[in-house]
Amino acid sequence: MINTVIYDFDGTIMNTNDVVAESWKHTYRTIYGQEMPAEEIRKTFGEPIMTSMKRVFPHMDPDEAVKIYREFQEAHKAELVKLFPGMDALMKKVTELGYKTAIVTSRFRNSLVDYLSTFGLLDYAQVLVTCDDTKVHKPNPEPILIALEKLGSKAEESIMIGDSMFDILCAKNAGCPSALVSWAVAVTEEDIQGENAPEYFMEKPEDLLEILK
């Protein structure tokens, strides 16, 4: 029986897809003077930003590239970032039902806390595991294992909710069931075939409540 719910953040709880994509486009134009291929943008979803920066701009100090990216994102997040409909109600309900909860993300902690506070979600996650907490990231199982240890939970009694193969494979590597949300933009049909398939699919947020029964 599941007693623990672990959420991804970007693309799962919060629709940061537009601000992330536009920030990458701006950074790419600033550094290379041309448009960033859509496939390259897709590859960055769910990946730690420093990893992406080192791959996309190998000739440049990644801290400088991140500075360009973050300045644009900070200036435009109010207009581009939105909560996925129904996720706040779902997280509130899951907490009220007594499930242990965590958010496991490759985002920096201060940025995550800022978004959670702004959208009134901070009380719905007992544990936050960010890229500040580990040197290895999804799909390595360590981020989930850290969350489970802090919560005193077992992998087989937990579920990871995510929007990317980084989330699904992280869960599999940790021995934890997973659910892929239908609003994922970085996953293809080919990605989720065979052994990579999640145990569950969520067409809408409230589907999780049926899975938990």
Image (cartoon, rainbow, N blue to C red):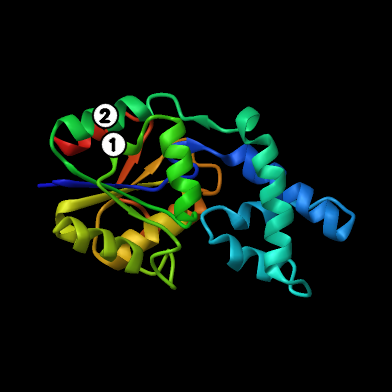
Q: Which residue is at a point 67% across and 70% down the rendered structure image? A: 54
23 or 85, which lies in front? 23
In screen coordinates, is 65 left or right of 187?
right
Residue 195 visible to an observer of this rendering = no
Q: Quadrant of residue 201?
A: top left
Q: Which residue is at a point 47% across and 57% down the rendered structure image? A: 106
Query: Residue 57 at what x, y percent from top left?
Result: 75, 68
Mark 1 surroundings within 10 Å by alpha-carbon count, few (fewer than 14), some (14 through 19), many (20 or more): few
170 or 15, which lies in front? 15
Query: Residue 206 at what x, y percent from top left?
Result: 29, 27
- The numbered mark at residue 41 is none
Circle 2 — which element? Answer: helix
In screen coordinates, is 56 left or right of 179?
right
212 or 110, which lies in front? 110
Q: Which residue is at a point 56% across and 52% down the rendered structure image? A: 45
Closer to the chain start, of discs 1 and 2, is 2
Q: Are marks 1 and 2 in contact (CB under 8 Å)?
A: no
Circle 1 — which element? Answer: helix
Kindly identify the amino acid type of the residue bearing the numbered disc 2.
Lys
Kindly identify the amino acid type of the residue bearing the numbered disc 1.
Asp
Q: Name the residue under label 2.
A: 92
Residue 174 visible to an observer of this rendering = yes
Q: Which residue is at a point 30% across and 61% down the rendered structure image? A: 144
Number of numbered discs: 2
Q: Is 106 rendered above or below residue 180? A: below
1 or 2: mark nearer the eye: 1
Q: Name the residue under label 1.
A: 123
